[in-house]
Image: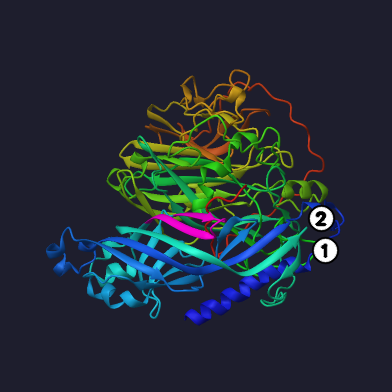
Amino acid sequence: MLKKILIALTLSLLVLIGSYAVQSAKARNRAGELNQKASDAPTGTLQKMIVENGSVTMDLDVSRLNPESLRGAAAGNSQTLHFSVGANSFFPVLVFNDQLRGPVPGSMALIPQNVPALPSALGASLKQLAVEKLPSGQGFDLAVRDSNTGFTFFNIQGHQYDYNPAAQSLAITNGRLLISKEFANALGRPSDAGSIAGTISIGAAMQPAEITQVANGQAQSMMMPPLQHALNPGTPNLVPGPDVIVGDIESVEQPQGAVNGNFVGLGVGTVSCNNGDQPIDWHPLPNTNHPVIPQNLYRMSGGADHTERFEQIGQSWMKHAFFALEEFICGTCNTSPPCVTGDQLCPGCADTYVASLNYDQGLIGSRAWVNPFTGVFPSNPDPNNHAGHNHTGTSHRVTVATSDLIPAQNPGATYFAEADYISPTEYAWCQAHPGQCNMYNNVSYRPFTVSGGPTNFTFIAAGATVRMQPAIQTWVSTGATVAQVEPDPGNDGIWFMGYKVTNPSAGVWHYEYALSNENLDRAIQSFSVPVGGANISNIGFHAPPQEPAWPNDGTFNNLGYSSTPWAVDQSGSITWSTETFATNQNANAIRFGTLYNFRFDADQPPQTANATVGFFKTGSPMTVEIQAPGQGGATPTPTPTPTPSPTPTATATPTPTPRPTPTPREPPAPRERPTPHPRP
């Protein structure tokens, strides 16, 4: 098995490194439209490092690892296991210009230095254990396995990577050892799967196995010749134009110490895929031609079947992408010119940011700087400037109240992680090619289960990634209605109107509404529902937590976005609203990547009606079809909200042709790579 892993890994690495050799040093023109200068391409030294030697320490609560019949006798038995790492273990990491770009699948053999008393299954495998970097799609980054049988004892979560280029050393710290499903079953306690059994730390001296000098995207010298067609890269059958999608949501993780009062900070690991036939710019800051990656967390709960409501419970700032790895994860990866590897994501290729990179607080910038439809954000001031403030454990991460996660307080709840890649390349291409606009399918989601608490949580994938759809679409499977709305085609993005009506008791109907903004820059300021002559009670509103104010956060006067709940007016219709843009530019509007909920109970059954939605920055209110209470079967006439103060918006050039609704596809089996502190 190990041999097969090594062969496959070697081929993948050779293709990655060899892809630089096929790049021209001349300025390139992408399909005669988008100019790419060779000077923008990456220049430096790319090293593939493997383990020369090292040590591993595991602190185990052995009382958790005994079979059920022996568990009580071993209570409180804690053991520390020491291992050396087999010389020249093939656990490769890629380092570009002395910055760790991430590990790729491989394995380091563990040689025990002490032999404590261990449960029989673990003790029998002690001399053949290995720490493995897992392929993407496994739900975890690292695992402790029997290298002969492949049996997984522990999955590793919460760890951090640190590479010291001067010493050529790699440290992996703060890893939590989670009992695998296999091991839990072997112990006779399936419910213990995912529970914490101890911690792990790794220190390793690294040595270069291959060194490639790259100049303007071209390999100048390397220790091994490139295998340009090792994995048969051809011309992928992809959609016209550039099209970045979230090919896989790998994991949701809470880093060590990511707690601030009653809130925790999380990160979402993502694999991007270029689903198009044109390259996507991936230039690092201070260049602004690269995607940004917001992350969200949702919860479905309430009612007899725990599906009454769908709420957003957390949001992050945005990771700024850099240096595309051109991985063979999404299918065929075509790195042929005019694509410039590293500085562009080539057609059919993938690039991975594991959770530890996406929650790195020094590498993520405020959402307020970016236009979510065009992908445009400034280079000056720096949208990734963290000067002038100190981070807490939750700062800029997906911030979630512990009360929204503790299993005992959320019985029957299910959770969904969502991620988005917002790319200015797609918008620029759309303006020049109106029939090739791919800015609407960049969001994907994945279900997770949550365990732990009260302040440390574990997230286990409960299904496959659903590609090219926002998380609110999962609500449809429970009987809710979700409709896509595009108020100004070609000039602004889309949002989703979701609603569900239930009948919790005789004569009472519960009305639940969710407004989800995918990439609508103008944002939403008001929501009005006609109620006829119905008696209304239990009026509610829900919104995810907002970031506090930070220096250089892109909000007006750096005051941060408001978290003030929306006001309610029951004059005729029931209307929720926040302040207008003219009154407060930082008002609590429904901005991109956020979902707000509105709810009430009524004594009348549902009928088809029109709700009125008012916008925050610009544009007149519009109506959308919903269900609402009423009398006599007549459709109520909505009462429009006051027109919000408009802000002029430049009219975009050619209006793109409406696109077909994407069909979700099953995710690939990608490779992942964590990265500690690369520069953005």
Figure label count: 2
Q: Nearer the viewer, residue 548 or 212?
A: 212
Q: Nearer the viewer, residue 82 or 294?
A: 82
Residue at horizontal 72%, vertical 44%? 287
Q: What residue occupies the far front of the structure in this picture?
A: 167
Amino acid type, mark 1: Ser
The image position of residue 1, as x and y in percent, is 47, 81
- Give the numbered dot on residue 24: 1
Residue at horizontal 48%, vertical 67%? 134
The local secondary structure at tag 2 comes to: helix
Q: Earlier in the sequence, mark 2 or mark 1?
A: 1
Looking at the image, residue 556 lies above or below residue 425: above
Q: Which residue is mark 2?
A: 38
Assess disc 1: are there few (<14), some (14-19) or many (≥20) residues with their C-alpha within 10 Å of its C-alpha.
some
Instruction: Using the rendered view, name the quadrant where residue 230 is placed.
Output: bottom right
The image position of residue 17, as x and y in percent, is 68, 68
Q: Nearer the viewer, residue 507 or 55?
A: 55
The image position of residue 248, as x and y in percent, is 54, 59
Looking at the image, residue 420 lies above or below residue 51: above
Assess disc 2: are there few (<14), some (14-19) or many (≥20) residues with their C-alpha within 10 Å of its C-alpha.
some
The image position of residue 387, as x and y in percent, is 57, 32
Residue stretch rendered in magenta on the structure: 160-175
Q: Is residue 622 left or right of residue 654?
A: left
Amino acid type, mark 2: Ala
